[in-house]
Image (cartoon, grey):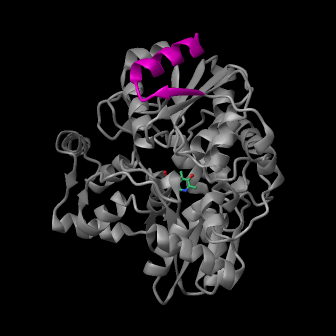
């Protein structure tokens, strides 16, 4: 298997080089040359595998022989040893039409751990095996940063710098990042919003001299290894839902921001997993909902919501979908992305919109709706939703049909977003791992939203 760029101007690469490259050198995103197909008979065999076994099977289709099976097994063992649940991502049945896939049992209590604990081990493996210097640089709306730092803290041969929007992440998210005192970790708290942080990162990665000189490696979901690691739980969730679905069709509802998680679902479906509807759930930052409903992809005004990890206007993985949408035509993708840059939007025809609507359903939940649902599910099912998951539930309630069941993804543990939970007068007991963060000293540099200042900080850190 080789990997190519959505914009078509990068020589085909193997798996490890694709991961090391992150953002493609032509500004596009890396995708597999062909999507491997999983026949029905194989799906039947996979249905009883454990999470770890499933990961090995899925990855085997993508990594060629670049990582020997025994090495991959060890990587998987180490990656998921820090998870608090033996199933890694358990599925809880709530009622006859709804199950919840709990993706928050990793060390930082959000779904990012599933891919990033693996990615940390992967980078460490590549650093040792190929003698690569790994300087991770990324932007976070809160959860990616915490999970990535946790994945590589203290690891030899790796340094990590994470930009987060100053005072626009939840308290627990901030503490998870800034209470880490390992020398290979730098937190930059940027006076701006997430899109500002992401823009700086995109610019620095686009500067190929700077990227090469400083050995910059990406952890954002533009990195294909994250997408791939996330496809595993789509298979896992589907198989668990299938056990009690009978003849009903199986949908998934996915709290979405950068389009990374839901794109993993799109990929799983293209591989042959018969998911019925892929439901995109967003909050009031609803560019994805507007695109699916009107065919106009246009960043709106940034809003701060109770689900800050989805406070995103420019969904960086959207380009991967666009690539398949235009029939894998890199020239067309470049044209669309150019329109986005020069005109600030992508508009598709009515005919094309129908195709989008065959691929996705979407709903943006209001702040108010989100709080109502947290109360409702606590009262009716004694299940405490975090505000991101509540958006997923809103989209499930809006789009799940009569003869369908839905797996809604719980992308974070409610303790991570207590600010919202307190608003509905629910007192939660914090897990001990989170409770103890409050008494630790914090390590971070507060910086202006100024690329030159950020570059200076980086140069000092990587020196
Ligand atoms: C990152 C995140 C999301 C959004 O995921 P994308 O892959 O960016 O679409 C949703 N919920 C939580 C809790 C997150 O941390």
In the rendered view, does 459 fall on the left or right side of 46?
left
Residue at position x 41%, y 26% from top?
Answer: 205
In the rendered view, does 283 fall on the left or right side of 359?
right
Q: Nearer the viewer, residue 94 or 334?
A: 94
Q: Nearer the viewer, residue 417 or 353?
A: 417
The location of residue 51, given as percent across then percent down, is: 71, 57
Task: Spot the residue most to the top.
Answer: 463
Residue at position x 80%, y 56% from top?
Answer: 431
Secondary structure that dominates the magenta span: helix
The location of residue 436, given as percent across then percent down, is: 81, 45
Residue 42 in view, yes or no? no
Q: Quadrant of the C terminus?
A: top right
Range of the magenta residues? Answer: 445-463
In the rendered view, does 379 fall on the left or right side of 136?
right
Q: Quadrant of residue 408?
A: bottom right
The location of residue 387, given as percent across then percent down, is: 57, 64
Residue at position x 49%, y 89% from top?
Answer: 403
Q: Quadrant of residue 91?
A: bottom right
When the figure is inspected, residue 112 is found, relative to residue 89, above or below; the finding is: above
When the figure is inspected, residue 412 is found, relative to residue 225, above or below; the finding is: below
Task: Spot the residue most to the bottom.
Answer: 402
When the figure is inspected, residue 187 is found, relative to residue 47, above or below; the finding is: above
Q: Nearer the viewer, residue 7 or 43?
A: 7
Q: Is residue 458 magenta?
A: yes
Residue 46 in view, yes or no? yes
Q: Is residue 264 magenta?
A: no
When the figure is inspected, residue 439 is found, relative to residue 311, above or below; the finding is: above
Q: How many marks?
A: 0
The location of residue 349, given as percent across then percent down, is: 16, 62
């Amino acid at each position: 298997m080789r990997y190519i760029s959505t914009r078509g101007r990068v020589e085909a690469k193997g798996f490890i080089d694709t991961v090391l490259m992150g953002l493609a050198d032509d500004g596009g995103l890396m995708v597999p040359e062909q999507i491997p197909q999983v026949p029905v008979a194989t799906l039947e065999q996979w249905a009883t595998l454990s999470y770890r076994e499933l990961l090995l099977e899925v990855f085997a289709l993508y990594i060629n022989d670049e990582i020997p099976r025994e090495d991959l097994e060890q990587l998987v063992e180490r990656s998921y040893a820090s998870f608090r649940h033996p199933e890694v991502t358990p599925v809880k049945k709530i009622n006859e039409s709804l199950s919840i896939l709990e993706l928050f049992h990793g060390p930082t209590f959000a779904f990012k751990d599933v891919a990033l604990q693996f990615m940390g081990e992967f980078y460490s493996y590549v650093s040792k095996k190929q003698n690569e210097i790994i300087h991770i640089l990324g932007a976070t709306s809160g959860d990616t940063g915490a999970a990535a730092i946790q994945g590589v803290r203290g690891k030899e041969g790796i340094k990590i710098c994470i930009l987060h929007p100053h005072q626009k992440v939840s308290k627990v998210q901030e503490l998870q990042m800034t209470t880490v005192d390992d020398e290979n970790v730098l937190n930059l708290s940027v006076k701006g919003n997430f899109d500002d942080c992401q823009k700086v990162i995109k610019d620095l990665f686009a500067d190929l001299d700077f990227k090469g000189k400083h050995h910059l490696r990406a952890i954002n979901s533009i990195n294909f290894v994250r997408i791939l690691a996330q496809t595993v739980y789509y298979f896992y969730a589907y198989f668990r839902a299938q056990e009690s679905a009978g003849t009903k069709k199986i949908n998934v509802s996915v709290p979405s921001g950068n389009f990374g998680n839901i794109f993993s679902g799109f990929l799983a479906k293209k591989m042959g997993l018969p998911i019925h509807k892929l439901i995109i759930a967003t909050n009031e930052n609803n560019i994805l909902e507007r695109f699916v409903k009107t065919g106009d992809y246009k960043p709106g005004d940034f809003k701060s919501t109770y689900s800050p990890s989805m406070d995103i206007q420019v969904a960086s993985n959207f380009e991967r979908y666009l690539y398949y949408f235009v029939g894998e035509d890199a020239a067309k993708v470049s044209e669309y992305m150019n329109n986005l840059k020069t005109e600030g939007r992508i508009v598709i025809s009515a005919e094309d919109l129908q195709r989008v609507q065959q691929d996705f359903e979407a709903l943006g939940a209001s702040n108010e709706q989100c709080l109502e649902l947290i109360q409702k599910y606590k009262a009716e099912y004694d299940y405490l939703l975090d505000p991101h998951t509540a958006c997923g539930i809103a989209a499930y309630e809006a789009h799940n049909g009569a003869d369908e069941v839905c797996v809604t993804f719980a992308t974070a543990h409610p303790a991570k977003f207590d600010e919202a939970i307190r608003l509905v007068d629910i007192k939660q007991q914090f897990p001990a791992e989170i409770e103890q963060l409050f008494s630790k000293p914090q390590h971070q540099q507060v910086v202006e939203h100024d690329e030159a200042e950020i570059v200076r900080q980086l140069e000092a850190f990587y020196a």
